Amino acid sequence: MLVLAVDTATSAVQAALVEVDGDELFLGAFRREIDSRGHVERLAPFIEECLAESGRSKSEIAAVVAGIGPGPFTGLRVGMVTAAAFADGLGVPVYGVCSLDGIGGNTRGRALVATDARRKEIYWAVYHSGERQGEPQVGKPAELPDLDVDYAIGEGAGKYAQELAMPAEPEAAYPDLVKLVELAGPRIRGGEPSEKLTPLYLRRPDAKPARA
Amino acid sequence: MNSEPIVMGIETSCDETGVGIVRGTELLADAIASSVEEQARFGGVVPEVASRAHLEAMVPTVQRALDEAGVTLADLDGIAVTAGPGLAGALMVGVGAAKAYSLATGVPLYGVNHLSAHIAVDTLENGPIPEPAIGLLVSGGHSTIMMVEDLAGEVTQLGASIDDAAGEAFDKVARLLGLPFPGGPHIDKAARDGDRAYVEFPRGLSAAKDMERHRYDFSFSGLKTAVARWIEAQRAEGRTVPVNDVSAAFQEAVCDVLTRKAILAAKEHGVETLLLGGGVAANSRLRSLAVERAEKAGINLRYPRPRLCTDNGAMVAALGSHLVAAKVPPSEMRFPANSSMDVTIVSLANDLF
Ligand SMILES: [Zn+2]
């Protein structure tokens, strides 16, 4: 089964075609650009390019998987609405997966996954052997509780390495689209009904009218 | 294409998630989900609240429109979407959705200008627009006089508000008078039982020296301040504020200057057709004053029913349909959402960014 995966929860605009063959996953085509303001311009062309590069037709896509954040809202919504509308247009199901799991799912030991939430905050969750412990949170990097983790990984870890109590991975890590598809695997293989995608909003909207 | 093009239009520039479907100039569906009730709690449009609501409503509203029209995505000849101007985060939801629907279905995509769409919607009610035409667009986001030489690509701005949009002034004065948001319909209603000449509120940019530099421009922030001062003065003297009369007098000041300048623009440019659009074009006094003055000036006045004046998907579909019929090239997948899109860009063809 061919699956389209997208994630725009971080500054990385990402799209991929992933082949699901039983328990095995193969990355067919992949596009990523680090452009925190370019989600709406780049994502649809990336999907086009993935199809062209892999020589596959859009009608072969059997399901769509989207990272549902947490992430800075404007960019995150672009990926989610793209996934939902593309799936609706094809008449195939769409499934949501926590974007942090696309990073944390690949970690070993005890790891803090931290992405950039802007306003000097991070979105974060703790992973133990690749399993998320509890719900994702948002907060200031210097004000995290005692987490007993070995290291921190993700854009937020690199950016706030000085303020974090644990060593940060120097290399930037973004949600791995193959991992997102893997996490949605049971739903994809089970042919579960399409989901209503709701972003993991961890903050309330700022209630300041635009035309005040 | 053996008959008129079937086009779906998506509009998310402010707080309405609109999806309309037209066949040529025939309206097949006009589905809307609005976050206005939620926005009313804040007394204005909160961009983040609007964007969240757009994402929630997008796919269901498309489905509702398709059901209402009795067509499928495969029947479409075009998908049009508001690319700007508007709230950036809100626009992105509609643009993202439209691109994805176009990708999934192979239906050509048109990124279009919200202002031109307000003009195009009139074709659904009154048929093809005689060109050239002058458009007076008034809403919470814009107060603009447009020159429409060719709705498929030649539109320019003759004037616009230099501060608040007319609709904003309605919202602000409504708040001063203790009327709910959005202010327009409530002021219109109160004004029906009021005296338009009760107070003479100022007409912005109408003095001789302003008419030189700002001939077709508007200003409403001074008017709002004048109303606020007047109300304050009344209250300071212990008098109750006659809401109906103040509504009527304020509304008169807005409608007077809007219609006066729009008619003037038409006369001075030798244009015989004047179109009204935008949410404030649903205002009963604006309509009656425009009718009266257009008749006197020998100008052909057109406006659609109130429901089509406010933001909706039908207007975007109407413009899309016009572009398809005029064989304007579709937009490429990489076009952006442009919150300050220039009025002269009717649609984002491949070479226009
Ligand atoms: Zn509008």
Image (spheres, rainbow, N blue to C red):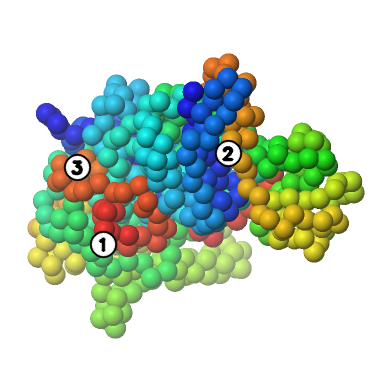
Residue B21 horizontal side relative to residue A29, left or right: left
Using the image as rendered, state which of residue A30 and residue B129 is in the foreground: A30
Using the image as rendered, state which of residue B254 and residue A23 is in the foreground: A23
Query: Rounded to the nearest whole Å, what is the CA distance between mark 1 and mark 3?
Result: 18 Å
Say if labels 1 and 3 share a chain. Answer: yes
* B229 to A91, vertically: above or below: below
Q: Earlier in the sequence, mark 1 or mark 3?
A: 3
Mark toward the viewer: 1 or 3: 3
Q: Residue at x 21, y 48 (%)?
A: B329
Q: In the rendered image, is residue B212 in sight?
A: yes
Q: Are marks 1 and 2 in contact (CB under 8 Å)?
A: no
The quadrant holding residue B213 is: bottom left
* Callout 1 amino acid: Thr
The chain letter under disc 3 is B
Q: Which residue is mark 2?
A: A177
Q: Which residue is mark 3?
A: B324
Residue A191 horizontal side relative to residue A113, left or right: left
Mark 2 nearby-residue class (10 Å; few <14, some 14–19, many ≥20)? many
Say if labels 3 and 2 share a chain. Answer: no
Secondary structure under the numbered disc 1 in the rendered image: loop
The chain letter under disc 1 is B
Query: Rounded to the nearest whole Å, what is the CA distance between mark 3 and mark 2?
Result: 37 Å
Mark toward the viewer: 3 or 2: 2
Secondary structure under the numbered disc 2 in the rendered image: helix
Secondary structure under the numbered disc 3 in the rendered image: helix
Mark 3 nearby-residue class (10 Å; few <14, some 14–19, many ≥20)? many
Residue B298 horizontal side relative to residue B237, left or right: left
Mark toward the viewer: 1 or 2: 2
Using the image as rendered, state which of residue B23 and residue B227 is in the foreground: B23
Q: Residue at x 75, y 36 (%)?
A: A130
Image x and y of residue B172, in percent: 50, 58
* Callout 3 amino acid: Val
